[in-house]
Image (cartoon, grey):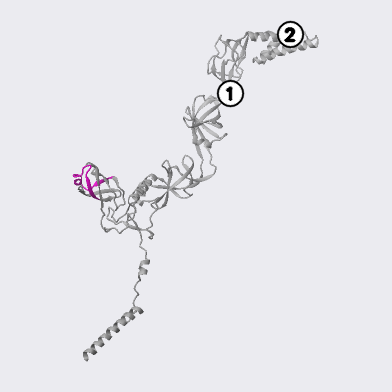
């Protein structure tokens, strides 16, 4: 009886204890009567998304990343970068980060893009030529002989009206005689009938017109009219003050009608025919003022103006002739001299400009590096317009006031290219958690065929297959070896399995080599 009663009391206590525990669990109280925190539900745990690991970056801010944990040469762990993490946003592909000390060592210098009038100077080489409108040819209009030369040297300076040469022509003598007879006949028939006098006057006028058509001077005609005596020779005089450029007349020579015996050029004004390059021709306009310099007179400048842009282009030199007219005081400018022509071109207005040194021209595109902060530079492709000696117009890509790199930009661009290359080789984040802890350097495995060995440099060229830990495709690349002993058993053509590490950014070092046996 006592034992049965004891068993019933024990069962009752167990039941009460279970009920109390259930009540405490459901009411937030523990068995001691104190409130407890409700356990997190499975749904609440699943609601927290896991951050996606992107890569590991250099702790010193150097442009070096790794797909797996590693240490830098100073033993500091690389910092994990997650997608969407505060302060750990992945940098844009066109952004490069450089440490402050490296910026100082490279001598990086920036200058703000500015609005300015982009005046420029077009320079061209040219040559002095005579003004074609001031060249005169002395050509008798009748047949005759050169009787005497008064100017008999090419290059001699002559004045206007100066005697050049004398000619004898039977036709000229006959024409003078006809005119003299006609003038005498008019005087003899002044008392005769009107018809006879009119006929003789017409004959005299025809003879006079014939002499004038032969370029007989008025003074000679007047002397012939007053004296009635014919002259045996006729003197030809210079029509202009200038230089004898060509002389074909010789003493005693016979000449035919229209034959040029002298050529005289007035060099008080000359031309400069400048060869302007094709890309500059659109900037020139008629009437533009120019400055001309001559090597013979380095201390002098001559002013002229553009009077004509020729409609043809030289296919050999890709230049267009441009005519510049200028005065020639003292005859200093001589035909055939070389000249340097400067043609200032005014800007149409203020445009956004950057220094010429800020542009990196690859041939297919133009790049400008824009400073985004201390040690951060963004590479931008720009569209360029007009240029001056020091500045270039930016049509698109850079705004007024933005700081652009004007010194050491090629070195920063090289850093950017290195970052892009490293990112292309190993920027993919691993899909699974890295097996190696962050506290040690991670080694990578590769298998392939030895393509070449350089014992002097301690390097081996390996034609390896894909490397999953770095997301590398199959390729042939050069590795360094940790010690010379690793090269002893390596021969071209040998199939090996190697383990390697990245000792420095971009420096891959083999630490272990094992031969592969043929299956």
Secondary structure under tag 1 reads helix
| Mark 2, residue position | 184
Q: Which residues are magenta?
A: 477-499
Using the rendered view, name the quadrant where residue 41 is placed.
bottom left
Using the rendered view, name the quadrant where residue 265 is placed.
top right
Q: Is residue 491 one of those drawn in magenta?
A: yes
Residue 248 visible in rendering: yes
Across and down, in percent, residue 304 comes to 55, 31
Across and down, in percent, residue 505 comes to 30, 50
- Sequence-wise, the earlier of marks 1 and 2 is 1
Above or below 265: residue 476: below
Across and down, in percent, residue 113 comes to 47, 47
Disc 2 crowd rating (10 Å Cα; few below 14, some 14-19, many 20+) is some
> Between residues 60 and 234, which one lies in front from this camera angle?
60
Q: Residue 470 vs residue 313: left or right?
A: left
Kindly identify the residue that appears in the image at 67 percent across and 10 percent down.
175
> Between residues 325 and 351, which one lies in front from this camera angle?
351
Above or below 182: residue 101: below
Q: Is residue 8 one of those drawn in magenta?
A: no
Secondary structure under tag 2 reads helix
Name the disc covering residue 460, or none.
none
Q: Quadrant of the N terminus?
A: bottom left
Q: Residue furthest front?
A: 519
Q: How far is disc 1 from disc 2 in space, using C-alphas?
A: 42 Å
Kindly identify the residue that appears in the image at 23 percent across and 87 percent down.
7
Q: Residue furthest bottom?
A: 1
Q: Residue 458 vs residue 288: left or right?
A: left
Residue 32 visible in rendering: no
Across and down, in percent, residue 243 comes to 55, 20
| Mark 1, residue position | 134
């Amino acid at each position: 009886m006592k034992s049965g009663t004891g068993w019933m009391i024990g069962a009752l206590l167990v039941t009460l204890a279970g009920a109390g525990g259930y009540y405490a669990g459901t009411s937030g109280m523990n068995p001691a009567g104190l409130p407890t925190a409700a356990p997190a539900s499975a749904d609440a745990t699943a609601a927290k998304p896991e951050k996606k690991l992107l890569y590991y970056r250099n702790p010193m801010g150097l442009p070096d990343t790794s797909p797996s944990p590693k240490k830098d040469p100073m033993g500091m762990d690389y910092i994990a970068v997650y997608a969407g993490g505060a302060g750990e946003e992945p940098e844009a592909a066109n952004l490069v980060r450089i440490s402050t000390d490296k910026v100082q060592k490279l001598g990086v210098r920036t200058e703000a893009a500015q609005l300015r009038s982009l005046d420029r100077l077009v320079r061209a080489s040219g040559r002095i030529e005579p003004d074609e409108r001031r060249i005169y040819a002395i050509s008798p209009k009748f047949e005759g002989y050169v009787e005497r030369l008064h100017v008999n040297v090419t290059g001699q300076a002559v004045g206007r009206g100066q005697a050049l040469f004398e000619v004898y022509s039977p036709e000229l003598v006959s024409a003078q005689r006809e005119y003299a007879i006609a003038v005498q006949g008019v005087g003899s028939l002044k008392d005769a009938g009107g018809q006879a006098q009119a006929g003789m006057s017409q004959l005299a006028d025809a003879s006079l017109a014939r002499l004038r058509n032969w370029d007989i001077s008025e003074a000679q005609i007047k002397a012939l009219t007053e004296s009635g005596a014919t002259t045996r020779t006729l003197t030809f005089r210079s029509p202009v003050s200038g230089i004898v450029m060509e002389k074909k007349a010789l003493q005693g020579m016979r000449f035919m009608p229209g034959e040029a015996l002298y050529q005289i050029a007035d060099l008080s004004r000359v031309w400069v025919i400048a060869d302007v390059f094709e890309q500059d021709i659109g900037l020139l306009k008629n009437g533009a003022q120019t400055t001309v310099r001559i090597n013979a007179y380095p201390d002098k400048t001559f002013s002229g103006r553009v009077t004509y842009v020729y409609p043809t282009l030289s296919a050999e030199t890709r230049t267009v002739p441009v005519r510049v007219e200028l005065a020639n005081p003292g005859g200093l400018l001589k035909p055939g001299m070389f000249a340097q022509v400067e043609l200032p071109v005014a800007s149409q207005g203020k445009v956004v400009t950057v220094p010429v040194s800020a542009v990196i021209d690859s041939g297919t595109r133009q790049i400008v590096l824009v400073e985004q902060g201390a040690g951060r530079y963004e590479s931008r492709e720009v569209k360029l317009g007009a240029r001056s000696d020091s500045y270039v117009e930016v049509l698109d890509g850079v705004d007024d006031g933005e700081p652009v790199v004007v010194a050491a930009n090629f070195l920063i661009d090289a850093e950017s290219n290195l970052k892009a290359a490293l990112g292309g080789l190993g920027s993919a984040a691993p899909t699974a958690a890295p097996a190696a802890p962050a506290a040690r350097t991670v080694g990578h495995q590769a298998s392939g065929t030895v393509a070449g060995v350089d014992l002097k440099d301690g390097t081996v060229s390996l034609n390896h297959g894909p490397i999953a830990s770095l997301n590398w495709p199959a390729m042939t690349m050069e590795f360094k070896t940790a010690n010379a002993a690793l090269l002893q058993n390596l021969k071209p053509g040998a199939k090996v399995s190697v383990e390697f590490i990245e000792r420095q950014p971009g420096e891959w070092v083999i630490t272990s080599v094992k031969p592969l046996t043929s299956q």
